[in-house]
Image (cartoon, rainbow, N blue to C red):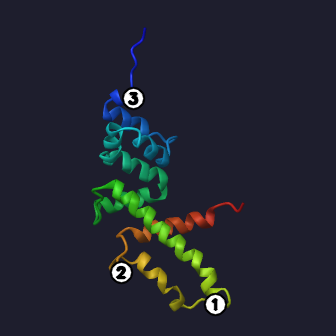
Amino acid sequence: MAVDVLISFLPCEVIEYILESDNIKIKDVMNFAMTCKHVYRSVTNSNKLWRTKFLQRWPNLREIYEKMDKDEYKVSDWMEEFHSSLESRKKLMEELSEMSANHYKKQEISHSGLKNFLPLFRSELGAHPMAYHFLIDELIQLVERPVL
């Protein structure tokens, strides 16, 4: 008779390797992380896994990050970077969703009508240092998304 072998017996490196697959989305990684403490620690402590998932989710940012790593911005916590990117994109979508209600009756939108977007893009106004790149990437994805 075979002895039961649990996935939690796998070394952290093997779990990371499996989770780095292109076929496994970040939502799957997070759901898997909630299964036990061992897996949770493996997922949350793996900077390499989070970097991989970040660049899988937003491949257009790879070149920018590689250039920034050499120059002025070095990421030390990729899980935090992932969350910052999601948060910036969420705020952008909130602002975009309010545009119709705020500007519906206007023929044109003035520069001052877009001032709510400045804190999203500008790091000197509290935005993440890479927020500009996050949001440009998000806007490009919105424009390129097929119409349903």
- Give the quarter of the image for residue 46: top left
Q: Amino acid at mark 1?
A: Glu
Q: CA distance from mark 2 to mark 1?
A: 26 Å
Q: Would you call the spot at circle 3 few (<14 residues within 10 Å), some (14-19), or many (20 or more)?
A: few
Q: Is residue 129 above or below residue 103?
A: above
- Above/below status of 73 relative to 111: above
Q: Residue at x 43, y 65 (%)?
A: 87
Evaluate if marks 3 and 1 touch, with contact meaning CB atoms under 8 Å apart.
Answer: no
- Earlier sequence position, callout 3 versus callout 2: 3
In the image, taking residue 94 as reference, residue 12 lies left or right, namely left
User: Residue at coordinates 35% horizontally, 54% vertically from top-left?
Assistant: 79
Q: Quadrant of residue 99?
A: bottom right
Q: Nearer the viewer, residue 61 or 13?
A: 13
Among all residues in the image, which is located at the extreme right? 148
Label whose residue precedes the other's in the sequence (2 or 1)? 1
Could you say whether the residue bearing mark 1 is in a helix, strand or loop? Answer: loop
The residue indicated by pointer 2 is 125
Which is in the foreground here, disc 3 or disc 1?
3
Residue pointed to by mark 3: 7
Dot 3 falls on a residue whose secondary structure is: helix
Residue 16, image x, y percentages:
37, 38
> Which residue position holds label 1?
108
Asked if residue 102 lies left or right of residue 148, the reply is left
Left or right placement of residue 136 versus residue 101 in this view: left
